[in-house]
Amino acid sequence: MPKCKVCGNTYSFGSSEVPPSAPTANGPVSGMIAQFNNQNDVVSVSSLGASKASITKAVDDPKQFFDTCIHCGSQDIDWNNSEE
């Protein structure tokens, strides 16, 4: 599963490719946020501004899309512990 090297988050990650629809100080860091389970599967996606095609691509290849920790904002994500 993905893991943030800064804060240890393993659950919720955003995509830097989809900017937030309305950037604010307290808003989300991404317009597309996924939650993962312990098997490295995307269990849900929240989207504000991402197309259905983008969401489908992201779910099919999450390593390429979900690169930002929702908790601390870091982009230092470790995917090495994930199952292939």
Image: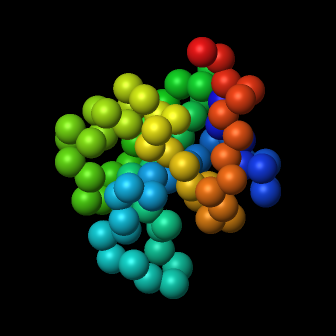
Q: Is residue 38 visible?
A: no
Say which of 38 and 15 sits in front.
15
Q: Quadrant of the N terminus?
A: top right
Quarter-wise, where is residue 52 in the image? top left
Q: Is residue 58 above or below residue 38?
A: below
Marker count (numbered): 0
Residue at left offset 29%, top offset 32%? 56
Position of the C terminus by quadrant: top right
Q: Is residue 76 above or below residue 38?
A: below
73 relative to 15 in the view: left or right: right
Image x and y of residue 46, in percent: 38, 49
Q: Position of residue 72 (x, y in %)?
A: 68, 64
- Judge whether 72 appears above or below 83 on screen: below
Asked where in the image residue 71 lies, by quadrant, the reply is: bottom right
Write down the quadrant of residue 19 in the picture: bottom left
Q: Residue at x 57, y 34 (%)?
A: 36
Expressed as whole percent of the image width and height from the top left, the position of residue 60 reads 38, 26
Q: Is residue 63 above or below residue 23?
A: above
Left or right relative to 14: residue 20: left
- 56 sits to left or right of 20: left
In front: 20, or 81? 81
**Residue extending farthest bottom:** 25
Q: Could one spot residue 72 in this view of the protein?
A: yes
Rendered residue at 44%/43% (across/down): 65
How is the model colour-coded? rainbow
